[in-house]
């Protein structure tokens, strides 16, 4: 029986690789586009198509099964109309739409999706999750991979170094770490900061038990000046990624809109996830699902921030605290189940973690010590005190310096690890 199962597994693996080889080359198609709109509308338009030399993703798990994020990207073989690749993700644009500014003006954001480089014509489709939580088709575009208009130019080549090498990028989670606000003279500090944060990251489960499923690389991309922009203090620095505090007017929210530079630097290494390290002592950071993570290096909470933010970008986990000072409005509307796997409005709790709750634990779960070690539905999460629930009393996704993920977050991180490494 064991031999039979082994032959079946090998057969399925060959079939999956054959399917990849039928449709794709082991390179990447990078699609830069503009995402434009206001608080109720959004539009897509193509900016630039590029061929990049590395495909680091799985050659087996080509279709996204998770249904997370605010957006979906689908690739169809044009001649047969077969779905051959898909991914879900979020962006800064979706967060901006919930701000007061989005009610008053229209903005465009640069965004990117990546897929294996197709051998034949493909049709790409973009979907936006509407206010009811349902994906709606917004845009489609036909791509001829033989077009001479697809750029092969390598725009920002830099040396890379390996922090952790566990194996073939196609069956590992590849994380590329990019420096922000490190001058050329500070590249040794960048390497030291990477080693410190990566070491801390792998001291925490479930990442600790899955260390052999990760590859991690750093890119030596220097900035002209050290640090980052802080508009509230009238500090402006010439840095390679143009990051800044006060994103959406939240002091500690440190992000960047320079999407094309991020992607051009990341392309120096195999990557599934992008992590930006910012050379500053000021507290801050951020991360968006399948977009990028960002962490400060010299604050005493840097190690906590590094792990917390990665779990947003990698596993789509939501924040479980309620006192963020965020400027979002109606981010989790009543009557709609959040897509984040660790948040619920109890509208469709059966599809969340209800199966992990003991029969004797009430839902909603009272804020009482006897339930603090239980999995339940504790009110207060997603930046609001009422109406959104989290799975545990405490977790890395809730409290600064807390050392453990709850059972629900751990389970969802593990599912994502398994998906990437098949």
Image: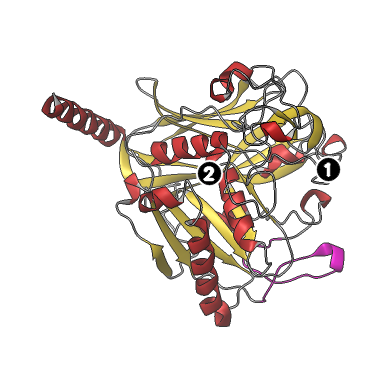
Which is more toward the observer, 219 or 387? Answer: 387
Which residue is found at the position 81% from the left and 51% from the top?
250
Which quadrant: the C terminus? top left
Q: Which residue is mark 2?
A: 314
Which residue is found at the position 64% from the left and 51% from the top?
402
Please, is residue 41 above or below residue 28 in the view? above
Which is more toward the observer, 192 or 119? Answer: 192
Residue 92 lies in what quarter of the image?
A: top right
**Is residue 325 shown to the viewer in this render?**
yes
Residue 184 locus on image (x, y percent)? 56, 79
Label 2's element? helix
**Is residue 173 shown to the viewer in this render?**
no
The answer to whether 24 appears left or right of 252 in the picture is left
Label at residue 342:
none
How many labels, in total? 2
Residue 172 locus on image (x, y percent)? 36, 48
Q: Residue furthest front?
A: 370
Q: Residue furthest bottom?
A: 185
* Marked residue nearer the N-terminal end (2 or 1): 2
Residue 88 locus on image (x, y percent)? 53, 33
Marks 2/1: CA–CA distance: 24 Å
Magenta stretch: give its range.
Answer: 225-243
Which is more toward the observer, 19 or 373? Answer: 373
Label at residue 327:
1
Which quadrant: the N terminus? top left
Residue 389 lies in what quarter of the image?
A: top right
Please, is residue 133 above or below residue 249 in the view? above
Residue 36 within the magenta-colored segment of the rendering: no
**Within-10-Å neighbours for mark 1: few <14, some 14–19, many 20+:** some
The answer to whether 160 appears left or right of 372 in the picture is left
Residue 160 locus on image (x, y percent)? 42, 68
């Amino acid at each position: 029986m064991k031999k039979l199962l082994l032959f079946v597994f090998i057969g399925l693996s060959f079939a999956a690789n054959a399917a990849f080889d039928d449709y794709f080359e082991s390179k990447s198609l990078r699609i830069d586009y503009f995402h434009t709109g206001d608080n109720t509308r959004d539009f897509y338009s193509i900016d630039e198509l590029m061929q990049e030399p590395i495909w680091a993703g799985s050659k087996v798990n080509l279709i996204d099964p998770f249904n997370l994020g605010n957006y979906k990207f689908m690739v169809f073989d044009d001649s047969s109309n077969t779905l051959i690749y898909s991914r879900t993700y979020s962006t800064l644009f979706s967060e901006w739409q919930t701000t007061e500014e989005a009610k008053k003006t229209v903005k465009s954001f640069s965004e990117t999706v990546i897929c294996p480089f197709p051998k034949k014509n493909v049709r790409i489709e973009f979907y936006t999750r509407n206010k009811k939580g349902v994906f709606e088709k917004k845009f489609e575009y036909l791509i001829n991979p033989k077009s001479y208009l697809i750029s092969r130019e390598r725009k920002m080549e830099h040396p890379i170094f390996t922090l952790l090498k566990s194996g073939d990028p196609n069956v590992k989670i590849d994380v590329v770490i990019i420096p922000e606000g490190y001058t050329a003279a500070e590249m040794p500090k960048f390497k030291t900061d990477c080693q410190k944060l990566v070491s801390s990251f792998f001291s925490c489960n479930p990442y600790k038990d899955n260390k052999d499923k990760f590859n991690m690389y750093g890119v030596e991309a220097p900035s002209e000046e050290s640090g980052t922009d802080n508009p509230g203090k009238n500090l402006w620095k010439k840095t390679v990624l143009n990051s800044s505090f006060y994103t959406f007017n939240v002091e500690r929210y440190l992000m960047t809109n320079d999407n094309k530079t991020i992607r051009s630097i990341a392309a120096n290494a195999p990557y599934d996830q992008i992590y930006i390290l910012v050379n500053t002592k000021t507290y801050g950071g951020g991360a968006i699902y399948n977009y990028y993570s960002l962490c400060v290096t010299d604050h005493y909470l840097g190690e906590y921030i590094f792990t917390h933010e990665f779990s947003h970008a990698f596993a789509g986990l939501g924040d479980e605290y309620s006192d963020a000072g965020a400027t979002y409005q109606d981010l989790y509307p009543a009557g709609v189940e959040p897509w984040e796997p660790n948040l619920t409005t109890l509208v469709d709790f059966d599809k969340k973690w209800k199966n992990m709750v003991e029969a004797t634990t009430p839902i909603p779960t009272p804020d009482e010590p006897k339930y603090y070690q239980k999995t339940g539905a504790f009110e207060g999460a997603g930046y609001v005190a009422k109406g959104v629930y989290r799975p545990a009393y405490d977790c890395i996704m809730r409290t600064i310096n807390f050392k453990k993920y709850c059972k629900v977050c751990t389970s969802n991180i593990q599912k994502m690890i398994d998906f990437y490494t098949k």
